[in-house]
Amino acid sequence: MNVRKIITCTEDIHTEGGRPVDPPARTAVVLAVIENPWAGQGFVEDLLPGIDEVAPKLGELLAPRVVEALAAPVEAYGKAAIVGLDGEIEHGSALIHTLKFGDHFRTAADATTLLPAVEKRAAAGTVFDIPLKHITDATIRSHHQTIEVRVPDGPRADEIVIGLAAAAQGRPQARLAPLSTER
């Protein structure tokens, strides 16, 4: 696995809707810009060797970093794969839609639900949204949120941006009724 760079971003929202948020609502994102392991190979029928080589290392690299950056217990989480223009969306999906990647974050966050994801092919600097859901109950509406991020110089055509995102709470000032009220 060739990592060009790792980016860590945190955000603390102190006011929402004109009202204080106490404690401030914290989110964190960690992104790794890596060389696409299938770059230059044309159509690769069997992605499994690349998955086995790269996905566990990425999960092991990113999961503790995003938890550390959040500096609080994780309540919501998500993941991303943004593939450079010479790659396939399947290349990003292969790396993030495997337990070999996601279980590192589930373990670090003490989570049980599936990680929501965004994956797409895009040019360097493209803005993308990482969806988040509650770590143990995906029906908890207050924790459905997104984090907007971008890497100004990535992904290059032969790269993939792989990311993990976490929130220490639901949306600031969330006030939607529980999903159970609509059943």
Image (cartoon, rainbow, N blue to C red):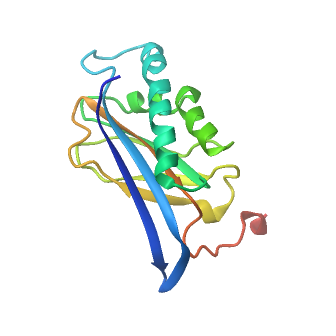
Q: Residue at x 31, y 26 (%)?
A: 36
Residue 19, above or below 73: below
Where residue 138 appears, as percent x and y from the top left, is 66, 52
Where residue 44 appears, as percent x and y from the top left, is 36, 15
Answer with the quarter of the image where residue 175 lies: bottom right
Answer with the quarter of the image where residue 109 lies: top right
Where residue 122 appears, as percent x and y from the top left, is 28, 42
**Front-most of 159 and 110?**
110
Residue 30, above or below 17: above
Q: Residue at x 27, y 21 (%)?
A: 39
Q: Which residue is outermost to the bottom?
A: 18
Q: Left of 22 or right of it: where is 89?
A: left
Where residue 180 appears, as percent x and y from the top left, is 77, 64
Task: Locate the C terminus by quadrant.
Answer: bottom right
Q: Residue at x 51, y 82 (%)?
A: 20
Q: Residue at x 59, y 52 (%)?
A: 74
